């Protein structure tokens, strides 16, 4: 776990469960009134890989989830806030690609960067001491409340987000995706950041329209000018923070899109960096590709899993330092 000297925050990707050690607990699958159909199960409780839905059994994961303030089978609030309706997306796209945001699209952790707005660019010790493993979103809510009390405004926060640099080669990768034929890529952003941080950066960078769907924690300013966060959903995955299991989101989205399209995607790609990107990557099949940022927690967890449990991680693994390495691999597949 890395700690940012600038803010005193532990690296968010490692904070997901407080450890980067490989642990794949036998999370028992549950069904019940809150289970959204299609999340890792189909009729008869048959598990499936994302790009090969009826052939291989996926790693076990608890998939009972509860969407906040929504009816059974509804869309989680983060998706309602930022995402266009998937029904309007072309059914002809061959590939589906997921991107994480913090330390994947951008070269910093957005939550850490907001500390620049605090007095002296540091948080008081009493506030940092309130962090509890697995409850980072609640901790961040207290940080934002403290910043508002110090006079930090919406404009201040937006300005900080807009200045975060992109990761090496990432804007080149986005340009590649934008210039591909419409039938090639469906692009989705999946992040444990929040709507305001992500929206601010994407619009400033001029790449908002690239993303067909965005799934993240909802964030809105209240009448007092404080940014208020809500959890994306609740779930029972033992590997992930309380407010978001990315594997649940990926499985649900792929199942819904496969049903709408009438066929699976040829391949699914996942570009990430953190420990909370390892969980969704576990659900990828042998034809899919995981792009972990080299030497970051996701990469280390994949490497350790290959060593400790050969065959458990099924996807092809292509580590990256620059987005241009991702482009090289994608060029190979679009030529197929």
Image: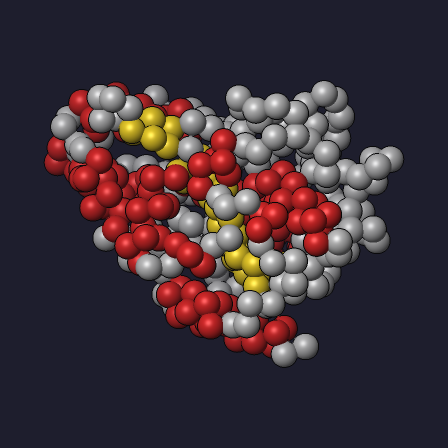
Answer above or below: position of 329 versus 291.
below
Across and down, in percent, residue 31 comes to 76, 26
Residue 12 lies in quadrant: top left
Residue drawn at the location 52% of the way across and 72% of the way down: 180
Quarter of the image with the C terminus in it: bottom right
Across and down, in percent, residue 92 comes to 65, 63
Answer above or below: position of 336 versus 7.
below
Residue drawn at the location 22% of the way across and 21% of the way down: 224
Q: Quick one: 299 or 93, which is closer to the camera?
A: 93
Q: Quick one: 146 or 2, which is closer to the camera?
A: 146
Residue sticking out furthest to the front = 88
Residue drawn at the location 83% of the way across and 40% of the way down: 46
Residue 46 shows up from this direction: yes
Number of callouts: 0
Across and down, in percent, residue 211 comes to 47, 54
Residue drawn at the location 51% of the way across and 53% of the way down: 212
Quarter of the image with the N terminus in it: top left
Residue 299 shows up from this direction: no
In the displayed structure image, the side of residue 197 where residue 6 appears, left or right? left
Residue sticking out furthest to the right = 44
In the displayed structure image, the side of residue 260 where residue 77 appears, left or right? left
Residue 170 lies in quadrant: bottom left
Q: Quick one: 236 or 155, which is closer to the camera?
A: 155
Across and down, in percent, residue 66 comes to 61, 24
Q: How is the image coloured?
A: secondary structure
In the displayed structure image, the side of residue 304 where residue 162 appears, left or right? left
Q: Quick one: 305 or 199, which is closer to the camera?
A: 199
């Amino acid at each position: 776990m890395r700690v940012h000297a600038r803010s005193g925050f532990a690296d968010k990707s490692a904070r997901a469960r407080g450890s980067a050690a490989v642990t794949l607990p036998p999370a028992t699958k549950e069904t019940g009134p809150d289970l959204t159909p299609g999340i890792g199960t189909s009729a008869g409780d048959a598990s499936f890989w994302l790009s090969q839905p009826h052939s291989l059994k996926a790693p076990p994961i608890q998939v009972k989830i509860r969407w906040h303030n929504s009816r059974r089978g509804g869309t989680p609030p983060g998706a309602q806030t930022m995402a266009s309706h998937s029904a309007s997306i072309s059914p002809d796209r061959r590939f589906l690609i997921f991107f994480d945001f913090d330390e994947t699209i951008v070269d910093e952790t957005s939550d850490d960067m907001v500390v620049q707005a605090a007095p002296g660019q540091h948080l008081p010790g009493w506030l940092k001491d309130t962090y509890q493993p697995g409850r980072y979103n609640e901790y961040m809510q207290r940080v934002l409340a403290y910043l508002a009390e110090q006079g930090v405004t919406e404009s201040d926060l937006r300005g900080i987000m807009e200045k975060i640099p992109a990761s090496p080669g990432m804007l080149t990768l986005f340009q590649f995706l934008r210039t591909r034929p419409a039938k090639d890529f469906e692009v989705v952003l999946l992040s444990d950041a929040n709507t305001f941080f992500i929206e601010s950066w994407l619009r400033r960078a001029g790449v908002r329209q690239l993303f067909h769907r965005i799934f993240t924690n909802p964030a809105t300013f209240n009448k007092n000018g404080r940014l208020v966060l809500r959890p994306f959903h609740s779930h029972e995955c033992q590997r992930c923070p309380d407010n978001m299991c990315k594997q649940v989101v990926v499985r649900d989205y792929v199942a819904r899109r496969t049903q709408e399209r009438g066929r699976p995607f040829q391949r699914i790609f996942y570009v990430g960096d953190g420990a909370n990107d390892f969980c969704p990557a576990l659900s990828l099949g042998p034809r899919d590709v995981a792009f972990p940022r080299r030497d970051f927690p996701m990469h280390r967890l994949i490497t350790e899993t290959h060593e400790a449990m050969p065959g458990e991680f099924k996807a092809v693994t292509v580590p990256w330092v620059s987005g241009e390495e991702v482009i090289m691999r994608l060029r190979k597949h679009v030529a197929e």
